[in-house]
Amino acid sequence: MTETIDQPAPQTRQDDPFPVQGMDAVVFAVGNAKQAAHYYSTAFGMKLVAYSGPENGSRETASYVLENGAARFVFTSVIKAATDRGRFLDAHVAEHGDGVVDLALRVPDARAAYAHAVARGATGLEEPYELKDEHGTVVLAAIATYGQTRHTLVERTGYDGPYLPGYAAAEPMVTPPAQRTFQAVDHCVGNVELGKMDEWVAFYNKVMGFTNMKEFVGDDIATEYSALMSKVVADGTLKVKFPINEPAPGKKKSQIDEYLEYYNSPGVQHIALATNDIVSTVRTMRAGGVAFLGVPDAYYDTLGEWVGDTRVPIEELRELKILADRDEDGYLLQIFTKPVQDRPTVFFEIIERHGSMGFGKGNFKALFEAIEREQDKRGNL
């Protein structure tokens, strides 16, 4: 059964005790940041905008900042671990492979946000501190969430540098595509252990004042072999959405079980990227070498009967293996990549929304079966 939680009216900045302005960055720890930056430039159509490394004073790490619209990814690798931070990043890559270490949130007041979060039970990782350069001042703080993931709280009001103090503007690695491939981060999905989903939902409710947006339980996300449960939390303005998944009992190993086994802990499973033209995005990314999950041709035989008319004709959706779903508010189009590294862990979703604020419930079975086919190829089903 699916339960959609009645939503309160979006809170104003004055009413919200933990106001969030949006996602500031998705930060990855990777084995080779230069190669990762090149891959996301060529395959995802992102643009390198800033760099930090030995050439501008960072002796321990190299970081590349890529943007596409409001979406910002940061790829960091260790050159020579000399501090606790460097040793943590080194150990993180060794244990988890390439993965997300930080879902950074832009806030109007990092000190107030940190104080509120810690007072409400969050584990503080870094107390508020300032970074300054000729472009202004940024205030940062950090709290812990599931696994070894953190939320850095970023207050950058009045700062006009390329990313953060310590980063220099950088030229693109390749020529970006003529049309932007996506505009923003739509949502970030976390996988947690069996029995821990409600605990982390309560964390976001209590610590950040996020509300429960949707729930998917029981037969909502299930096939003959495997299942999962998911609840979605969001800030008062719905700019930041975090689905939290946990495995559910099934005949065989679910995608969540596989992720937890190979990532060795809870963590970020996938990042959904919002686009205004999913057809152009998929064609560009496929040309750049991105592999997407396929769905059986039969999925499209009856799609028009329950989805109705969409901006993209059914035959073009069939050609590109794009999924569609409709709810009471409108419809959406979506497609999922295969894992983007050798471990079957992090992958991406491309989503085009037309009114719907859902997550593709009508596609869960087809998507899950597609993932199971890939799991079976890896011998992990």
Image (spheres, grey):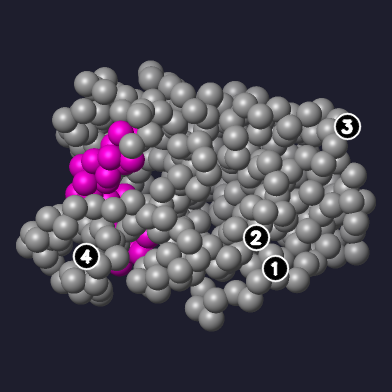
Q: Where does label 4 land, which residue?
A: 318
Residue 365 position, x and y percent, is 20, 42
Tell me if residue 206 comes above or below residue 65 in the rendering: above
Residue found 68% across the figure and 41% down from its top: 31
Distance, label 3 to label 1, CA atoms, is 29 Å
* Comes first in the chain, label 2 or label 1: 2
Distance, label 4 to label 3, CA atoms, is 52 Å
Residue found 28% across the figure and 61% down from its top: 322
Dot 2 and dot 4 residues touching (CB under 8 Å): no
Taking 268 as reference, is 53 left or right?
right
Residue 274 position, x and y percent, is 44, 62
Circle 1 crowding by C-alpha within 10 Å: few under 14, some 14–19, many from 20 = some
| Viewer-proximal residue among 257 and 110 | 257
Q: Where does label 1 land, which residue?
A: 173
Distance, label 2 to label 4, CA atoms, is 30 Å
Q: Which residues are magenta?
A: 351-376
Q: Where does label 3 land, which residue?
A: 82
Closer to viewer: mark 3 or mark 2: 2
Mark 2 is on which residue type?
A: His
The quarter of the rendered structure image containing the C terminus is top left
Mark 1 is on which residue type?
A: Met
Residue 253 located within the stretch drawn in magenta:
no
Helix or strand or loop: what does disc 2 sit on?
Answer: helix
Circle 4 crowding by C-alpha within 10 Å: few under 14, some 14–19, many from 20 = some
Tell me if residue 100 comes above or below residue 331 in the rendering: above
* Comes first in the chain, label 3 or label 2: 2
